Amino acid sequence: MKIVLAEKVSPATLAIFQKEPGWNVVTADKIAPGGLAAELVDADALVVRSAVQVDAELMSHAPKLRIIGRAGVGVDNIDAEEATRRGIVVMNTPGANAVAVAELTLGLMIAMARSVPRANSGMHAGKWDKKSLQGSELRGKTLGIVGLGRIGLEVARRAKAFGMNLIGYDPFVAPVIARENSVTLVPIDEIFSQSDYLSLHVGLTPQTEGLINKHSIAIMKQGVRILNCARGELIVDEALVEGLKSGKVSGAALDVFRKEPLKDSPYFELENVMLSPHIAGSTDEAQEAIGIQLANQVRDYLKLGVVQNAVNVASLSEEEYAEVSPYIEMAARLGQLMGHEAGAGVVGDGLGSVESISLTYNGRLAQLKTELIRNAAIAGVLHGSDGINRINAAAAAVERGIRVQEDKREHVPGGTGATLRLSLHWVRKDEGAPGHQATPGHQAVAHQGDWTGLATVIHGNSPRLLSYDGIDIEAELAGTLVIIRNQDVPGVIGRIGTILGEARLNIANFSLGRSRGGRVPEGHALAVVQLDVAPGDESALAGAIAELKKVEAITSVRVVQLPKL
């Protein structure tokens, strides 16, 4: 084996490779300037951080390369599509810096509570300004954590030691995991309204972009403090600046930004915001942990064929992959559709926390290798959660306390030859409608149920929805879908068309289904409307959705963005 370490790694990382007998390990200091391509001619593995660009041209010099390891989470410097085409596994190391990020989060909270930056600068200026520096304690304050993945849970464990009250929002973490970490799961609007400190630990998705905006800040407590060590795009900067200036937001601590490095920012003029240059994961310990984790992953793959934290491929032959890949894509889209229904983005009107995921493979689908189909469906359900992909999705679900159940039925009478049924079991505690806050002194009521979708593939590569929550319907799983539930009465279809037409939104497909009794009582109907939404049409779409919700016979409207075919 030849292992090329294209960038500097820790001694502990290097030692893992050097312990393997017969392995030729080439370190960065032994590679001549411009000589990386020559070293890769007979290399089995390449390890990089963020500086080396592993593009198609570089990979063309590496005919034997089997794995590219990225010491870190982001793989923007690696052409994963080209690696997949060449049969090269691309691995990263999500979660290895979770403790580092959590510690900085707590450090920033303390710094805000005690005005540490202002105290320090004042002392350096020769001022003894003790009276204006009276602070507050973290003890007894409510910390709202948005995102309870590895980092969010590490923050919760540390904040608990400070005596804080912990509330959290993450529709993809089972209640038992939250309870074990003393976190009370609540809808997102309650996170906003109840938090003294609000900390963001979610990935960037269309549903989470702009999570902190003018409207969410308006329902927050007076004097709330906001921390962001996740993604800069989660915050609408103009809205936060306005909140900081008005005093609605008494302080903010930001480690990430929409554009980095940060230049010419309105934050520079504000004394009540702390800024750091994306250093949350930058500790000696975290960087060493990342290197060690990656070295173990690369070693295990080369010696045992074990794939961990891969971002691109799974263990299938070329023939197997050709047959199963359309169903993998179908499962991912169905999962994303169902997960959006459960999580409901950021508005707090979702079903609740997903406790279990059930998959039933019918017909020909039951005869195939279904691991990637399963993982694609789970990754779709957990869409937007940090570090989750089609390789590690099942393990990530288990880590979050979500049970995964599978069933295969090769012989199904009638119907299409290969279908996937995906069911989510959800639980929510409240007193009524989703997002409704429990009345003080009254016990919250537990609500639970199942949400089910059935899908297949037609024409070889077209994923189709066949059933949605007990109502048969046929709709393409692609593009912008508006899902409308309504009473089965005259005039609804025409009203929908009128509203969308007045908004100048073109209807690409209009699929209808009606309840035939059973799970969904008669008198209910479902429409899945596929729209052509061009860049710049977002405001028109938002306005149309608002108008649709005003129609008396319409009971719910939801927009789901799926990849185009």
Image (tube, rainbow, N blue to C red):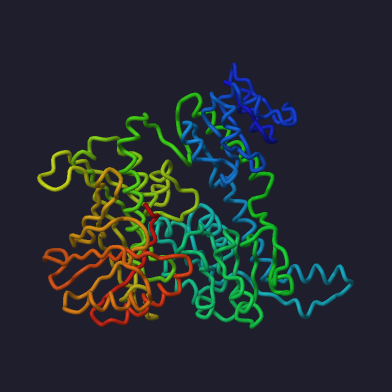
From the viewer's perspective, is 348 left or right of 489? right
Number of numbered callouts drawn: 0
555 lies above or below 91: below
Residue 476 falls in image quadrant: bottom left
Of 88 and 273, the residue lying toward us: 88
Residue 10 falls in image quadrant? top right
In the image, 138: left or right of 448? right
Q: Residue at x 50, y 80 (%)?
A: 219
Using residue 148 as the reference point, say whether residue 139 is left or right of it. right
Horizontal and vertical percent for residue 450? Answer: 25, 60
Q: In this view, does 194 lie to the left or right of 35?
A: left
Residue 438 appears in the figure: no
Relative vertical location of residue 346 with respect to residue 319 in this rendering, above or below: below
Image quadrant holding the N terminus, namely top right
User: What is the x, y in percent for residue 25?
Assistant: 64, 24
Could you tell me if residue 487 is visible in this image?
A: yes
Q: Which residue lies furthest to the right in this view?
A: 126
Q: Residue at x 70, y 72 (%)?
A: 266
Name which residue lies at 66% across and 44% down. 285
Indicate the position of residue 313 as horizontal and vertical percent values.
44, 37
Q: Front-most of 263 and 391? A: 263
Residue found at the far top of this picture: 22
Query: x, y percentage for residue 16?
Result: 61, 28
